[in-house]
Image: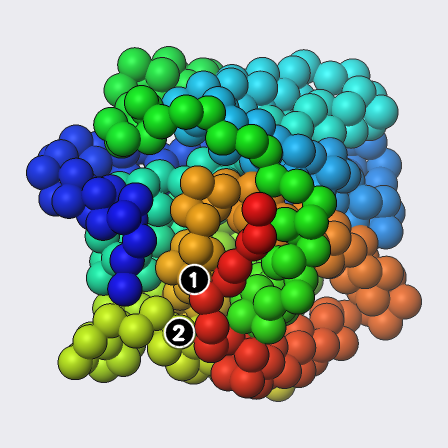
Amino acid sequence: MMTGDAATSAREARTVPSRYVFFVLVFLMYVISYGGRAALSIALPTLGKEFTLTPVQMGWVSSSFLWSYFLLNLPSTIVLDMVGARVIGSLAVSVWSLAMLLGGMVHNITQFLMTRVLLGIGEAPTFGVGATVVRNWALPRERGSVMTVLLTGMQLGLAGGTIAGAYLITLFGWRFEFVALGGIGLLWAVVWWLVYRDPAQKATAPRREPISLAQIRDLFRSSSFIGILTVQCTQNYLNFLVMSWMPLYLMHELHIDTTGTGTRTALCYLSAAIGAIIIVRVFEQVVFRNEIHPPRRRYIVAACLTGASTIGLLPHFHTMAPILLVLSVSLACLIAANGANTALLTDLVEDGQKIGTVTGVTLTCSNSLGLLSPILTGYIVFYTGSFDMAWYMCAAALIMAALVSLMLVRAPIRMKG
């Protein structure tokens, strides 16, 4: 059953073809954002040599953008709900693009870390922007598929950023790839400002008050929110581990060079993106065969998390084909789980006007684990000489998160006030 606002949004969405342009732009925002993250992961070996970094120090560098990203997820999405996705989207991407440009011009590791902190400031509200656009413009039946397709932009960005970065580093050095990505981001910010508009009923509605502490407390009293949050935290940990360390893992395990690593990493990301879209479409057809009942998405989430737990098989393989297969399957299931879980959140939060802030709350919590992921992995590699323990930990956590989702995610998420 949809509320009056949701029904109005659904009717308007059906009659506004430009909403597909908005979805494409959000997709491209994720592509550019994660291309920037991939730029660091593929540049890390070269950058580490230039600045003489140990594995532990490289882990801290990989996590550096998360310091400000984590702190500003909630404040930035509160502002997002107050002023709208058009302003915040353009401003956020402009800030992180400037950070990328500056990152290619630094002279020491301290300056580089400062640009990563600025990058985190810019990226803080971006998933809130995406969730807001989906809630505003996607029909209820299609939200899971739309969100999953949008999130595959992350994988396309990681793939493109990794393979392009590998060749740019080989030809021009790591600094050039940072400057190029910064320029592309600034172009996107201009296009978003010129193109995006809020739905008519939201543009003319009175400005709403920001979320209150009491309403945030209500979120954590909801078993459905706790289940969704648990999944978000777990998948985010693995996501940041792979994003930060996969190129170095492939170099370590397969003994290949930078361009070879970039090509194989990109192949994993592209395969995962295609696989995720197929997985979520098939599961949605099965789960919603007779009627739309949003809590049933938890079955999709649990199945996909179980598939993602195959990452725990990696320590048993030491040749290229099975390693790339396991990584591709695990990442495909992880993206599908993320898309279904995010769609669950947009479906179950009754006050759709605060979906950006609610997304910010989930990101603040989940990124606390994301922040630890590259750091903890750096210590594991330093002290054990391998990635095995990191993969086993992720597999166990994903299975537990699947069980939590099945047990807890059932009712709408209500906030008083």
User: What colour scheme was applied to this rendering of the protein?
Assistant: rainbow
- Mark 1 residue type: Leu
Left-right relation of 298 to 242: left
Residue at 21% of width from left, 36% of height from top? Answer: 19
Find disc 1 in the rendering and name its residue.
348
Is there a contact, CB below 8 Å, between mark 2 and mark 1? yes
Give the residue at the far front of this rendering: 417
Which corner quadrant of the image does residue 315 belong to? bottom right
Which corner quadrant of the image does residue 148 belong to? bottom left
- Mark 2 residue type: Pro
Left-right relation of 185 to 39: left
Residue 329 locus on image (x, y percent): 42, 73
Relative vertical location of residue 391 with respect to residue 180 in this rendering, above or below:
below
Residue 110 locus on image (x, y percent): 85, 25
Relative vertical location of residue 291 with respect to residue 249 in this rendering, above or below:
below
Residue 54 locus on image (x, y percent): 86, 47
Of residues 399 and 167, the one nearer the viewer is 399
**Gap in Å between the C-alphas at discs 2 and 1?**
8 Å
Crowding near the residue tagged with mark 1, few <14, some 14–19, many ≥20 C-alpha atoms within 10 Å? some
Left-right relation of 163 to 22: right
Crowding near the residue tagged with mark 2, few <14, some 14–19, many ≥20 C-alpha atoms within 10 Å? some
Residue at 31% of width from left, 69% of height from top? Answer: 280
Find disc 2 in the rendering and name its residue.
295
Residue at 71% of width from left, 45% of height from top? Answer: 213
Mark 1: secondary structure: helix
Q: Where the N terminus falls, by quadrant?
A: bottom left
